[in-house]
Image: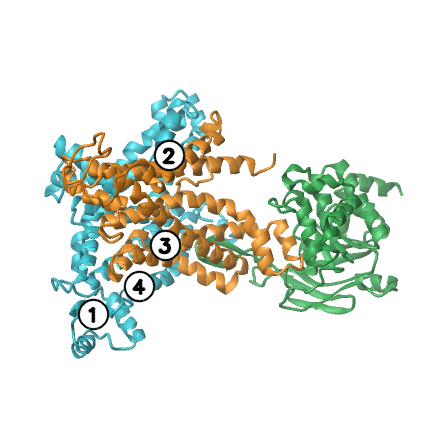
Chain colours: A green, B cyan, C orange
Amino acid sequence: MTGRQATQALADPPAILELNGVSAHYGKVRRRGPGDRRPAARRRSPGGSGALLPALAGVHLTVRPGESLGIVGESGSGKTTLGKCVVGLMPISAGQILFRGQVVGRPGRVADVPRVNGVQMVYQDPYSALNPKRTVGSTLREILTVHKLCARSQAQERSAELLESVGLSADILKRRPRSLSGGMCQRVAIARALAFGPTVLVADEVVSALDASVQAQVLNLIADTRETAGLTVIFITHDLAVVNQVCDRVIVLNRGAVVESGLTADILSRPSDPYTRSLIDAVPELAGELWQR
Amino acid sequence: MAAVAASGRGSATRRLGTVLRRRVIQVVPTLLGVSLVTFILVRLLPGGPVQTLVGVRATPASIAAVSRQLGLSRPLVSQYFTYLGQLAHGNLGYSFLTGTSVTSIVASHLAVTAELIGLAVVLALIIGIPLATVSAYHRGAWQDQVIRAGTVATLGLPSFWVGILLVTYLGLRLKWFPSGGAGTGVVGTVDHLFLPALTLALTFLAVVVRSLRASISEILRADHVDAARLKGISRFRVFSRHVLRLASLPVVALVGLNMSYLLGTSVIVENVFALPGMGQQLVSSILQRDFLVVQGITLVFGLIVIVISTAVELIQAALDPRSAA
Amino acid sequence: MIGAGIAGSAVTPVGTGVSRARRRIGPNAVLIVGLSLLGLLLLACYGAPLFTHWSPAQLDQNAILKAPSSRHWFGTDQFGRDIFARTLYAGRVDFLIGIVLVGVALVVGTLVGMVSAWLGGVTDAIVQRLVDIGFAFPFLVLVISVVGLRGPGLSSLFIAVSFVAWIFYARLVRSEVLVLKTSNYMLAARTSGFSTARVLVFHLLPNIVNQVLLYATSDFVYAVLLGASVSYLGLGVQPPTPEWGAMVQAGQNFVATQWWISFFPGLAIVLMGLAFALIGDSLADKWRSGGGQQ
């Protein structure tokens, strides 16, 4: 059963996010010397024919409102690229991205997704996620006032509310990121994303840099928020244990292409692709657990 | 990048080739830019270059005549291409004052400037390496603090002031060295170059000591140096063999990166000591409004900086695989 | 700016000057010393009437080429002018030169560097090329060529420097921005739906300001050295305006016997350099150790 068929079989409410045959290429320009600007990191196909290897190759993806979707793969599988394309940080080279049925992403351009009530992202490294020169409060207030999400006089109050919703006290507002722990930074990052009132939250390896105990807290936090706010969450991760814990559906990426997709329970217990199998085997607890089923 | 890494043997040459090719491609637009800048420099004088030649009270007719004669009435673009063509043949124009070709003027003065800078670098290293080593060896101790305090104090050291002081005390009062001009033969040349070179070296010294201190610290802490010492090799031999060899790379980089500064300061120093180098020639040409000479010398300065920094990059690439990234 | 391209000058991130050693003394102590020295110099120069009753152009006919004494603290020159007064008043000119040269270069260079690095693409390529070309010339050479050809004087100096000095800041800012551009909070700023101007000014700029200011502290000294050197050559500040470099030149012929004419103005430059070096080093130390995680 292909990814397409799986999603179609389950689809009922209209998709909030769709990727149709989306491809993207590595186009990172790495500086090598003064004035030398040539794209590096262009992967050549193994045969040495000189053709460029894409970061994403013809990905089809449908995300339904309110669901919790996992995108897994090793590093280099294209999962982070997928996140970046969806959120509008990287241009796609082929295909289309649709948000609420409207085309927001076309080839050659960066996706133009709405920021308020739209798509927001939380990143992997908690320590660089927040502007070191701004207090937490100023970061949150700026979002609220620039986008007129609440009255200026109420921005402070609203910011405190946002912090409370992620389990942080209001006096964090006065602090700067460098005085916060990794877990706290990540919560603030989530609060920041939530300030936009997003419909879709992309969580790119958000717990990979955190301790195990803090991981669970942050994951639970996202799960709770998802329930209360009706958020759609896309988890990008290499860790199947995370997927097992929080995702309803999962999509497996290998070298930029979707190799498997379906309900988490199904995929994890009966992986049809050897690549998926190897990912499961890499997580001993998971493999053990599944053996017992 | 993965494409170049590959095997060890022969990769040094390949690396060099890649770096050379890349650098040459990069450098061509810069060279063109440099020639354009010097071209514009002179053409955009208030009143035009002709004005300075014929003087303030010239009639419009004579101005026009001279313009036509010098080819200055043609469109700028065609003038530029003529200029480029001349450059390609090594023709930098002629001095208005003496009629000699600018190229020969540059050639006759280049040696003095080169010697000045060369000797200055040598002196800076002779003084700087021991200082940096002492500083690195006794990291944090009073020797280190004193030396570093010294480097801090010399940030604002004016080259002309230092030069004048040196001339006064070592040249005039103590009569150890001559106070100006050029000398003949090796001994005479060094004799006349010593104070100017020392002046230049002193202004450069702080930078040398700081950078070398960092590099030497790093090297002293490196494992293989410890291993050598464990083998029982005397400290001095360890130093001279391993440390100096490894420190030569940063020294090359240091000189290369600061060549621009050295050339600029040499102009001042030459004027303080009346040394017949390019800097002194540049200033006197400026004062005498001999603009083609000014243009030519400025261009040559630019070329030297480019050539030296390219050479330094090549040497670095050849000696140190890590830096060719 | 003569040596603004000096690699390894006061602003290197690795073990600058006295910074690490001063951990015993503390960067704050060094900062205070530096600021005090600077304050003293500024006070002396701008508050010159408080310290001396002589004016820089005033001629004391009885005291030609007199050595330092209680009447003339720094001695007199060949015209009977008091060197102490001239040194103090010249400080105003030199400080002005420093501020203007650094100010213009900093503003223009930071702007260009930031925008060019952020936008990337063709804009960045062009700017990079311009910067490379600018760096190909020794800065002093370019400046005196332009000044000389345009006609000596302070305005020529300002114009000449303004055309080129921005490249130092542009290069510094550009490399900073290229690094910061990929950090997560800048990515977040990009996906926040803010205008590019807001992102650059309120998110990017605050994170590069420290580096720029740090560079500016040593650049100020280089700017004054440049102005003094150009004036020394006779191409900068014109007489009778007192200026440190010009004063050194004026005393050069007398230096064997009347050393004070050239000595004190030069010393003033050194002291100013010392003040800024102390300030710059202590700031570098503070910002490096305190800027990270605590």
Are labels 1 and 2 on one chain? yes
Q: Which residue corresponds to mark 1?
A: B51
Rounded to the nearest angstrom, the CA distance separating label 3 from label 1 is: 31 Å
- Where disc 4 sits, the SS reads helix
C-alpha gap between disc 4 and disc 3:
13 Å
Please check whether the numbered discs 1 and 4 fall on a single chain: yes
Q: Secondary structure at mark 1?
A: helix
Residue at far front of view: C53
Disc 2 marks a residue whose amino acid type is Val
Residue type at mark 4: give it: Ser
- The answer to whether residue B179 is visible is yes
Vertically, is B196 above or below C154? above
Q: Chain of mark 3?
A: C
What whole-number distance in Å separates the C-alpha atoms at marks 4 and 2?
A: 38 Å
Kindly indicate whether the residues beneath marks 4 and 3 are on one polypeptide chain: no
- Give the numbered dot on residue B162: none
Q: Is residue A249 left or right of residue B61?
A: right
Q: What mark, if any, has residue C135 been given in the picture?
A: 3
Disc 4 versus disc 2: nearer the observer: 2
Indicate the quadrant where residue B231 lies: top left
Q: How many C-alpha atoms fall within 10 Å of the one at disc 2: few (<14), some, or many (≥20)?
A: many
Q: Which residue is mark 2?
A: B152
